[in-house]
Structures are given as C-alpha cells and as structure tokens.
Image (cartoon, helix red, strand yellow):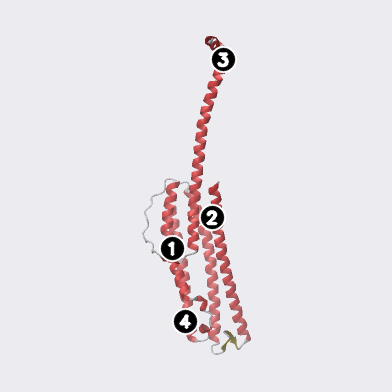
Amino acid sequence: MWRAWRSNAVFKRMLLALVVLIMVLWVCSLVSDDVTQSLREQRRERGLAADSRELLVREQQRLNVPDADSLATRPSAANTRLAPARNAKELLSGMRVIVDEVGGRSRYRQAEVEARIAALHLQDLLLPEHLLSEQGLRSGRAVIRRYITLLNYSLAINRTSQAELEQRLRALAAELPEGRAVIASHDRNAARGLEEDNALLNNQRVAIGKIERIYALAEARLGQVQLRDNALIFERQSDANEYNRLVRDIQALAEQRSAIYRYRQARVQAELDEISKLKRR
C-alpha cells in the first residue's frame, strides 16, 4: 500500500507541498526573529536617546533654580577622562559623568552668587533711609555696584559652563551616529536658555537704571524731600510724578521678570512631558 501511495502522483504533489510549507514556516520564523530583534534594538536605542535628552533637560531645570542644597558640598574641579563613546549605552553613561561634573560646579557657583545677592537686601534700596541722606545714597549705590558685579559673574558662570559642557559632549559623541541627536538637543536647549538668560539680564539692567535715576533725583533734591507716614513728599509735583513713574516701571519690570521665570519653567516641563510620552511608546 505504501508503495502504491509513493507511486501516486497526487501523493507526490502533497509531499512536495508539505516540504515547501515547512521551509516557508522555518524562513518566516527566522525573519520574525530578526524583525523582533530589530524592533527590540530600535526601542532600546530610542529609550537611550530619550534618557540622554532627559538628562540634559533636567540638568537645565536644576541650573535654572539654584538652591542652598547646592552649597552643601564643594564639587571637585577635576574632570574624569572619557574616551569617545562606542555605543548608546556608553554615550549615556559618559553624559551622566559630564553633567554631574560640569553641572555640579555650575550649580555650586550659582548658589554662591544667589547667597551673595540675597545678602545685599536689594528690596531695601528704595527705603527712605537710602534716599534722604548722602550716606544712605552712598551705601545704596555701593550695593548697586556689587549687584551689577554679581550679575556679570553669574552670566560668566553660565557661559563658561555651557562652553565646557558642549566641548565635552562633542568629544564624547564624536564617533557615534546617535551622538548627532544628543548634540542637537544640547544646542537647542542651550540656545533657548541663552535667550532667556539675556532677557533676564536685560530686565535686571533696565531695573537698575531706573533705581539709579531715582537716586539721582533724590540726590538733586536732598533737603527738599520730606518723609510723612513712611511716604516721600516732594516739594515739586513734577518730581513726585517722576518718582512715582519710575517706581511703577520698576514694579512692571519685576512682573516681567517673574513672567520670564514662569515661561522658562513651563518650557522645560513641556519638554520633559514630551520625553515622557516618547519613552512610553
């Protein structure tokens, strides 16, 4: 019977079809494994890229709001020697080292600046004791000069840190295709941060200019301004109008400065939310 089946043409076609089917299933299995592995690698690379981007954004978030905790421990001035990354994992690991070293030093220095600015008690610059005597005007102007020096120092810290961060990131990612996306993300964040820093610095310089004009007015009218119910009373209405206008300008600039800070916080948070969505895909 078996010999009869073997000689049967239908049986031969069925056997051939079965062999072909088995081979097709085997090939499909290999292709499926390759596709699965490829998708797994793609997800892993996307995850590492998102982690790298998130690392830079969160560091910017910390730099934007220096706090007293940053002064707890003085960071080392030494840099870890890093070879160019050979894969995405090494890139992320190297970025963590760079951000920790460069960012740690920058946060420490900025926290020092913030502490020094807080010690100036800038909110007292327009109090009557600063405006109604030569000694008060001299001490107020000395505070303004120190404040300007600290503002310039803060800007220099930011620019030096950004330059060092960019240089070390480029060296780390130079031989890696994935590094281009990391550098692009850094450049984008740095450009936005610099734009916001410049807006804040310009705001503060304009505010200082307004305060200096009030000091010039007070100096020109020494002995002619009275203090009544904790308010300045000028002999000339035009002087009172000028003083009140300058005070309103300073208040408007403070509101503008707060708006810039809120925008910066919202922008950084929006980017973190976007990264979070990418990582869930």
Q: Which residue is mark 2?
A: 272
Task: Judge by depth and name the residue closer to the eye, 176 or 109.
Answer: 109
Is disc 3 in contact with disc 1, using a CB cutoff of under 8 Å?
no
Residue 237 quadrant: bottom right
Q: Amino acid at mark 2?
A: Leu
Say which element carries label 2: helix
Q: Which residue is mark 4?
A: 139
Residue 228: x and y, percent? 58, 87
What's the CA distance linking mark 4 and mark 2? 45 Å
What's the CA distance linking mark 2 and mark 1? 21 Å
Is disc 3 in contact with disc 2, using a CB cutoff of under 8 Å?
no
Q: Which residue is mark 3?
A: 11
Who's the residue at 53% across and 71% down the image?
204
Closer to the eye: label 2 or 1: 2
Residue 251: x and y, percent? 58, 74
Of pointers 4 and 2, the one earlier in the residue sequence: 4
Who's the residue at 44% across and 61% down the image?
161
What's the CA distance linking mark 3 and mark 1? 80 Å
Q: Amino acid at mark 1?
A: Ser
Q: Amino acid at mark 3?
A: Phe
Q: Residue furthest bottom?
A: 223
